[in-house]
Amino acid sequence: MKIVVADSIFLTDEYRKRLEALGELEIYDSVPVSLDEFIDRIKDADIVVVGRYGVSAEALRSAPRLKMISLWQTGFDNVDLEEATDHGVIVSNVPSYAFESVAEFVFALTLNLLRRVHLADMNLREGLFDWKYYVGNQLMSKTIGVLGTGEIGKRVIQIAHGFNMNVLSVTAHPSPERAKALGVKFVDLDTLLSESDIVTLHVPLTPETEHMIGARELAKMKPTAILINTARGKVVEEAALMEALKEKKIAGAGLDVFEREPLSMDSPLLEMHNVVLTPHIAFLSEESLDECTYISIENVEMFAKGKPQNVVNPSVLKG
């Protein structure tokens, strides 16, 4: 059995040895520069471990021996699941990791924006030492709107309570019992947008959530509000967000994800001082990296034992 680690992931000697125990191992420690290069890497593989690089229908058709893809991430929107299922390829992900890291990062972005840390740092390096430029806002008593109450959303809510914030939430499964347990008020999306000082997104990318925050939704927000996106870039209509920021329809945005990644160097976002931009790193802590790799490698081991786990295209198991 040939196992290919097809792009750059966190892989210690311990995890490498666990993969070597299962068969022939080939490791690539860089992101492919093209689809052709990716195909060349996986064309003879039985199992592929892949991080952020997408697995397209063309790539799947070019790897006739492929039986299993172990994703080194939670999201699987960059894999053609229909094509994988048609070819009998099991796709497993890491369903629950890094929620502590991502939730904490939400507040790193939020505090940076509210207290203008990025501007103070930039200006101080140029010799501007004047406190009047950096009057900001505190979190206490502000209202945070949390879209989604999965593991990350729930942890964001817990941290928000530590700052003595009011919490609104939109969830697919509201109930008085859940509201009491989480300490939130469940509302509809329009209410959340219009009443929140901070809006933070914690939903997966699906056809239903793509561009769920567009011009109409941004217009509902307070002009003093900020938007935080550590979910998926396409949940927000980027052009509409840039317009809202430019016209000061909202006060700012903290963005860790973008519609197209990497972010283009000619993006207008790079010229805006009311945004904080990071390169898809909310998950990136030593603890979360190790956790992700542990589960990703375990997925491969369980597949090799004939007991696949964390399968995101379960219909393939019925074939």
Image (cartoon, grey):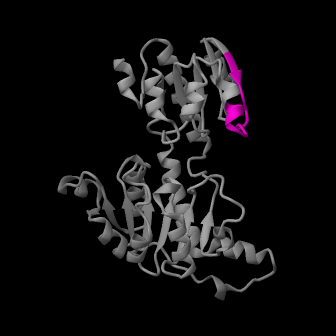
Q: In this view, does 63 lie above or below 21?
A: below
Does 200 sit left or right of 54 as displayed?
A: left
Most foreground residue, 151 or 80:
80
Is residue 15 one of those drawn in magenta?
Answer: no
Q: Where is residue 85, by image quadrant? A: top left
Q: Where is residue 49, by image quadrant? A: top right
Can see residue 317?
A: yes
Residue sitting at x 51%, y 36%: 79
Most foreground residue, 91 or 98:
91
Task: Point out the image quarter for the C terminus.
Answer: top left
Does 128 sit left or right of 208 as displayed?
A: right
Does 284 sit left or right of 139 as displayed?
A: right
Most foreground residue, 273 or 176:
273
Tell which residue pokes out farthest to the bottom in this image: 132
Task: Point out the image quarter for the N terminus.
Answer: top right
Residue sitting at x 38%, y 66%: 145
Q: Where is residue 24, by image quadrant? A: top right
Q: Position of residue 249 (x, y in %)?
A: 48, 80
Is residue 36 one of those drawn in magenta?
Answer: yes
Q: Position of residue 77 (x, y in %)?
A: 48, 42
Find the magenta span and give its range: 25-38
Most foreground residue, 166 or 305:
305
Residue sitting at x 51%, y 76%: 244
Q: Is residue 121 above or below residue 105?
A: below
